[in-house]
Every structure is written in C-alpha cells, then in structure tokens.
Amino acid sequence: MSRKTIKFVIIITVIFAYYAIFISFCKAIGQATKPINIENALRGQEYDQSVIIVNTENKQVTVDVSARGAIAGWTNFYAKSEMRIATTTCNIPSGEKLTLTAIFRIPDDAANGKYAGSIAVFQRAGESTEATSTVVAQEVLREVNIVVSDKELIDLTVSAIPESYETYPGRDLPVRLIYGNTGNVAISPQVQIRIVRDEEILSNVILPYPEGLSAIKPGASQEISDVKLATEKLAGGKYVAKMDFLINGQPKASDSFSFSVNENQARQIAGMQLGSWAEMGSVRQSAIPAVAAIMLAIIVFWIIKRKNKHNINTEKK
C-alpha cells in the first residue's frame, strides 16, 4: 500500500471517529422547521399552529420559546394541557418531545400585507461534567409568514366516522365528527343528517353546534363525539347516512357512509334477555320448596319446644 493511500485512509478514519464522538457527546434540541404560512388572515381573528420541540439530550432540558420579527407581538404559546395561561419556558424530559400551540392574533389595526417573522426555540448553555454530555447554547428557528387581507374565506373539511357499520332497531349509532377549519374565520358548523334508503329520505334532522363548545379557529381542528343516529323506527336492511355541514345555513362540506340495521341481532339480544329472566324465574321457583321446608321445620321445632315446656310445668305441679 502506498504512503498516499495510507495517508488517505488515516484521514477518513479520523473524520469518522470525530463525527462518531461528536454525535455521541454533543446532543441537541430541535423543532419542526417547515415554514408556517397563513394566507388571507383577517383582522381580529386567531390562528392556531402546532410547535413540536424534540429533546435528544440524555437529561431534561429547559428551553425558551419566543416569536420574533413582525409577528412577535401577535404570538402566544400554550401547553396543550393548559390553554388558559401563556408560557415562554418549558421543561422537556430526556428523549421526549413537547407539543405547544402557537396562537397568532391579528391586530384590529393591522394593514393589509405580508408580515414575516420566526418562532425561536432557545436552549441556554449548560455546564459540562464527566457524567453529562457537552451542552452548548442552541437556537432553532422556524419561519412564519402571515398575509393579512380583507377577503373572508369560509371553508372546512369534515370526516364522519361511525362507531360501527351495523346496528339494530332501538340502538342509536354513535358517530364521530372531525372538523378542520381551512378558512380564515372561526366557525361553528351545524350538521344536517339524512337517512336514506333506495333514494327515499326516512329521516332529516339538523343538529346545532354543541352549546358551550368554542368555535373552531382558523387552521384548527375539533372532534365531536356525541352525535347519534336514531334507529328505533328503522326496519332491517341497508341505509345511507348523508351529512351536510352548514355555515350560516349554507352547506360548505358533506360526507356520507353506509350502515345496516340487523333485526336478527335485536331478536338474539331480546332472546338472551328473556332467557336470563326465565333462568332467574326458574331459580326462584326451585328455591320455593327449600324455603317452605325450612319454614315447616321451624314451625315443628317451635311446637315440640312448647309441648316439652308444657310437660315440664305439668310434672312440677
């Protein structure tokens, strides 16, 4: 092997060794860096975005979170477990990630135009010891661009997911509704539910947005799980649940799914209930002779006892 080749091998070995040591001892924090772009933002509206911070250190770290640039005064950060109190400092356990919600509130006096800034996640420098990794001051930035305009955009996505695709008469069918607000104004959608069989509408109801539930902010999602399809008047067979989602009385999205009503299942359940009642009745009936025998034994014992007492009193006299 030539001296030139040996020198090349040594250099490559040193480089690999350096990176192996560097990766092992110099851990880092990170955040999802895909830019946040909000188009057609309206004055006075709030927009939610998730901020995911990852700790690859071998110990818990404390990070500072802030917004910079033109959007600095518009931004607050909240832990998902506490959405009432804004936070700027977070503790992240070793090897775990933390998800914060960044809420951008567009000022009422913001002029139309593009506003640029960033979300900064900063870890302060720490002391290095033999037992800990090397910790240097680190900062990770995520670009934010918000375009403010006067154009109102109402749009949403919805998924309707039934608990099951089969039920029986008298058992309401629970349905989960998952909303996504893709517009630029907060929304509280109603849902119109039609149950159809062979193009005949058998049921048609409009359910309001749940009272007490906050409107869905632009860019945010919301799940509603207390919607139920009434099936007590449906005969056995296959049906389609057609749903229109209304904003200010106008349909903005739709979804549908097929389900079936199984009358045999209802009969089986009724038969099981009758069987259990009959079994309980037979148990009660079989218990009657035993109870009667016990009562008879008590009465006989009482009569014998009184007779013996009477005989003893007679002998004493």
Image (spheres, rainbow, N blue to C red):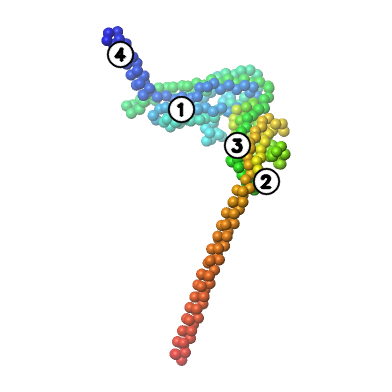
Q: Position of residue 198 (x, y in %)?
A: 70, 38
Q: Label 4, on which residue?
A: 10
Q: Nearer the viewer, residue 33 or 276?
A: 276
* Residue behind mark 2: 235
Q: Where's residue 148, x and y in %?
A: 64, 21
Quarter of the image where the N terminus is located: top left
Q: Is 23 rendered above or below residue 198?
A: above
* Residue mark closest to the camera, 2 vs 3: 2
Residue pointed to by mark 1: 54
On the image, which quarter does residue 59 sit in?
Answer: top left
Q: Which comes before the other along the chain, label 1 or label 4? A: 4
- Which residue is the site of mark 3? 161
Identify whether 128 is placed above or below 292: above
Marks 2 and 1 sit apart, C-alpha to C-alpha, by 54 Å
Residue type at the position of mark 2:
Ala
Q: Where's residue 114, x and y in %? A: 61, 18
Distance CA(mark 3)–CA(mark 4): 61 Å
Residue 239 percent across, percent down from the top left: 66, 40
At horizontal 57% and vertical 54% (from top left) the residue drawn is 272
Nearer to us: label 1 or label 3: 3
Residue neighbourhood size for the residue with mark 4, other residues' Cα within 10 Å, grouped as few (<14), some (14–19), many (≥20): few
Q: Residue at x 61, y 44 (%)?
A: 167
In the picture, residue 18 is in which quadrant? top left
Task: Using residue 42 as the reference point, say whether residue 137 is left or right of it.
Answer: left
Name the amino acid, label 4: Ile
Is residue 10 at all visible to an observer of this figure? Answer: yes
Secondary element at image label 3: strand
Name the residue located 63 percent from the left edge and 36 percent from the top edge. 257
Judge depth for marks 1 and 4 and give the one in front: 4
Disc 1 on helix, strand or loop?
strand
